[in-house]
Amino acid sequence: MGTPAPLGLQGAYALGQRSGYDELRTRLLDVASELLMASGPESLTVRRIAAEAGCATTVIYTMFGSKEGLAEALYLEGFERFRRRLAAVTPRPDPYEYLVALQPIYREAALAEPGYYSLMFERAIPGFVPSERARTLARAALNIIDRVIADCISAGYLTPTQPRKVADALWAAAQGAISLERAGHLSDSSTYDAVTSATISHYLIRRG
C-alpha cells in the first residue's frame, strides 16, 4: 500500500474542528447525565446545562435541536457506551467462554454510569419517548451478544432457536437483578450472577 496523502492545512483544520465538536458534544452529554442523577429531570434545562458545561445555549440548540433532541442523544449515547464496553471484551476462541465473559458487562455498565442507565431503562425524564429509529439503534447495541449466541448454537452449546430470543431473555434477567440492586434490595452481584447464569443454562444442551 502507498503512503496516505498528507491532510494539508484545510484537511487538518477540518479534522481539528470535528474533534473539537465531538469533545464538546460528549462534554454536554456527560454534564446532562450527571445533572440528571444529582438533581433530577427538572435540572435538565438548556440554560443550566450550558452554564455547567461553560458554553452558550445556542451551542446546545445547534447540536441537538431541542431539549427532546438532547434527551434522545443521551439515550443513544448510553447504548453506544454499552456497545463499546461489550466490544472491549477480548473474544475467546470458544463461543461459550466468550458468552460467559460478556455476562458481567451489563451490570458493570449500569453501575458505572447510572445517569445514562436511568434514562435508558427507568424513564428518568418524564414524557420522553425515544423514536422508533432510536429504539432500533439501541437494540443494535446487543448485536455482539446476538452473534456470540448464534455461534454457541452453531457449536452445539445452546438449543437451536433464534439468537435474539436467548439474548432478550438474558437481557430481561440482567435488568431485573440490576433494578433490585439499584433500589437497594441487593447488596452485591450474587443474584445478578445467579439469574444470568440460570438463563444461559436454560438453553444449554446437556451433554451426557
Image: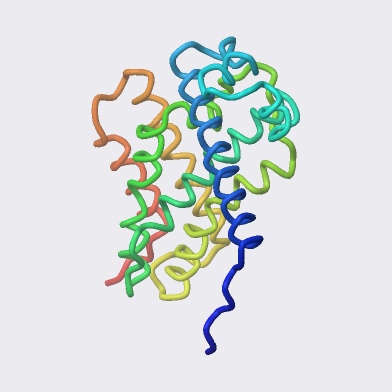
Relative vertical location of residue 206 with respect to residue 186 in this rendering, above or below: below
Residue 40 x %, y %: 52, 12
| Viewer-side residue, 106 vs 196 | 106
| Viewer-side residue, 205 vs 115 | 115
Residue 160 x %, y %: 51, 67
- In the picture as drawn, the residue positioned furthest to the bottom comes out as 1
Count of marks overlaid on the render = 0
157 left or right of 76 in image: left
Residue 120 x %, y %: 55, 32
7 left or right of 169 in image: right
Residue located at (38% from left, 66% from top): 205
| Viewer-side residue, 168 vs 205 | 168
Residue located at (61% from left, 67% from top): 8
198 left or right of 11 in image: left
Residue located at (46% from left, 23% from top): 34
Q: Which corner quadrant of the image does residue 192 belong to?
A: top left
The colour scheme used here is rainbow
Residue 125 x %, y %: 61, 19
Relative vertical location of residue 106 with respect to residue 72 in this rendering, above or below: below
Relative vertical location of residue 80 with respect to residue 153 in this rendering, above or below: above
Relative vertical location of residue 12 with respect to residue 56 in this rendering, above or below: below
Q: Which corner quadrant of the image does residue 9 belong to?
A: bottom right
Residue located at (27% from left, 72% from top): 208
